[in-house]
Image (cartoon, grey):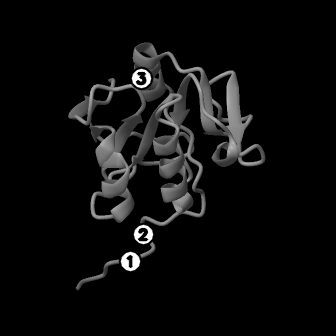
Amino acid sequence: MGNFDSNRFKSSNQCWETPDVLFAALDSEFHFTRDVCASKENTKCKEYFSKENSCLDKRFDGVNWMNPPFENMKSFIKKAFDEREHAITVCIIPARTNTRWWHDYCMKGEVRFICGRPKFKGCIHGLPQPLALVIFGNLNGSTMKSFHLPR
């Protein structure tokens, strides 16, 4: 199978900061009130939950931005799904359409597949995997759309 390096796309950093241009485009549509997976250094909103002050045991309200750590994706997606009656949460995640959690939770929200490879802060290149925005909350049913990266 050639010289495929299985570690080529692995990273010890699971908390890449959302690109400002991508966040700004979404913020102009949703008007976020809280970043639910952030740190003081990378939060996109004045209000935020951090690793030390985890969103996983908090009640959501308002309009939330979620760029969860990839290593525990299912827990964060389930939390956003569970809070959909109280809040709107926009999640940027890998489009792992072959997983049970994708079908159990993501397919019940609005899914927007990202066209392009956003370059997260601190990364040299854009992620080599497909990404999606999954939106939970007061929506008119499950829909799928395309989201083009701002230039």
Residue appearing at x 54%, y 47% in the figure? 79
Image-based side of 45 in relation to 74, left or right: right
Q: Residue placed at 29% from the left, 39% from the top?
A: 111
Residue 103 % position (x, y): 30, 56
Q: Please report contact status of discs 1 and 2: CB closer than 8 Å, yes or no.
A: yes
Quadrant position of the C terminus in the picture:
top left
Please give left or right for residue 41 compared with residue 137 in the image.
right
Q: Is residue 94 above or below residue 146?
A: below
Q: CA distance from mark 1 to mark 3?
A: 35 Å
Q: Position of residue 144 (x, y in %)?
A: 21, 37
Check disc 2 and give the amino acid type.
Arg
Residue 34 appearing in the image:
yes
Q: From the image, tell me which residue sits under label 2.
A: 8
Q: Measure the alpha-carbon separation of dots 3 and 2.
A: 30 Å
Q: Which residue in the structure is indicated by mark 1? A: 5
Disc nearest the viewer among 1 and 3: 3
Name the amino acid, label 3. Leu
For residue 77, the mark is none
Q: Is residue 140 above or below residue 115?
A: above
Q: Which residue of the protein is positioned furthest toward the right in this rendering?
A: 52
Mark 1 residue crowding within 10 angstroms, few (<14) / some (14–19) / many (20+): few
Q: Secondary structure at mark 3?
A: helix
Residue visible at 52% across and 38% down in the picture? 83
Q: Residue at x 50, y 15 (%)?
A: 31
Q: Residue 119 appears in which quarter of the rendering?
A: top left
